Amino acid sequence: MEVIDLRSDTITRPTEKMRQVIAGAEVGDDVYGEDPSINCLEQLAAKKLGKEKALFVPSGTMANQIAAMVHTSPGDEIITEITSHIFLYEAGGLGRLGGVQTHVLQGERGLFSPEALEGAIRGENIHFPRTTLVAFENTHNRAGGRVFSPEELAPHLEICRQAGIKTHLDGARIFNAAVALDITPDLLVQDFDSVSFCLSKGLGAPVGSILCGSTDFIHEARRVRKILGGGMRQGGILAAAGIMALEEAEARLARDHRLARILAEAIEKMDNFQLEFPVESNIVVGKYLGAQKIGEVVARLKEKGLLVNAFGPSSLRLVTHQDVKEEEVYQAAEIMGSI
Ligand SMILES: *Cc1c(COP(=O)(O)O)cnc(C)c1O
């Protein structure tokens, strides 16, 4: 039985063409700055995002953690939304690696209000930690792939600017956000001090993420990457895949979004599921309305050839990506409706 895997856009495998690009990649020692493929990828990524410099890192988690470590000092406080990846899914790295305290704000679909942000920023007082960083996420995973326009985040960024607080954007799926809004990604990140994104999700590369920012920021980030063990020597075989992903995959993301909408429309007609969030990119969250435990639902879908992830006590997350065919999306909907 062919399995339909909608657990994540991280599961994509390199295409035959990408494997050839990997096999033919020019390489050198990147810790000496001598890997031509990594240098090329970093230049291309910085240009696409309109930042001075970029750094190739093994994962999105490392990119976010490096950003936090560069922007803050131990004992500082980071503000982020309560369902953000950097708070929920990075194994406590902010506290453990950066020695910083996290101040989480309850958001509405992934974003807190400007007033809540203003109220959370610490004043000058010897009792308080210093608020030195606010981290945002776009698209927002836990909010069902929600896309934030530049206008929606502008008031928050203005507050940070006036308070002298740095801003980081976890843009793991920033190209999905740009495609959904039909604008270039640089417009979504221009007012952030740093931005991370994943090559290994919708863009289809096997490994790697990018961290972008000013020349000074990336200089420090390169040092912190070394501290964390992320200097990768002949990493050009991975960067070559990243270059191809950046050059070619962006155009394909609109298809992923279209497939997600097909799935969403099918879920809207089901008796046993409903949509938890409007579908804005490649993530669909279905709320299960039946009597079974969500773990049993996931197991029954698996028996029928559909892999999905549980997303809380009564919800499932389904993610569209390059390795899923259009007819498989219809089959997935049929399987969901049948349990
Ligand atoms: C996947 C993801 C990350 C981390 O990426 P890894 O490469 O898996 O470490 C960070 N933020 C968001 C929003 C993500 O979806």
Image (cartoon, helix red, strand yellow):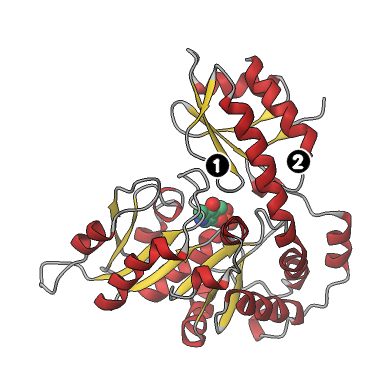
What quarter of the picture does the C terminus occupy?
Answer: top right
Residue 238 image-quadrant placement: bottom right
The residue carrying mark 1 is 279
CA distance for labels 2 and 1: 18 Å
Q: Is residue 216 above or below residue 90?
A: below
Disc 2 or 1, which lies upstream in sequence?
A: 1
Q: Is residue 195 above or below residue 114?
A: below
The dot on residue 304 is none
Left or right: where 25 falls relative to 266: right
Residue at 61% from the left image edge and 69% from the top image edge = 184
The dot on residue 324 is 2
Report the front residue among 1 and 126: 1
Q: Is residue 131 above or below residue 204?
A: below
Q: Residue furthest top?
A: 291
Regarding mark 2 in the picture, which secondary structure is present there? loop
Residue 99 image-quadrant placement: bottom left
| Residue 233: % across, % down | 69, 75
| Residue 260: % across, % down | 64, 40
Left or right: where 113 falls relative to 21: left
Residue 47 image-quadrant placement: bottom right
Residue at 47% from the left image edge and 69% from the top image edge = 66
Task: Note whether residue 97 is visible.
Answer: no
Q: Amino acid at mark 1?
A: Val
Count of numbered circles in the view: 2
Q: Nearer the viewer, mark 2 or mark 1?
A: 1
Q: Amino acid at mark 2?
A: Val
| Quadrant of the displayed image that contains ligand 1 | bottom right
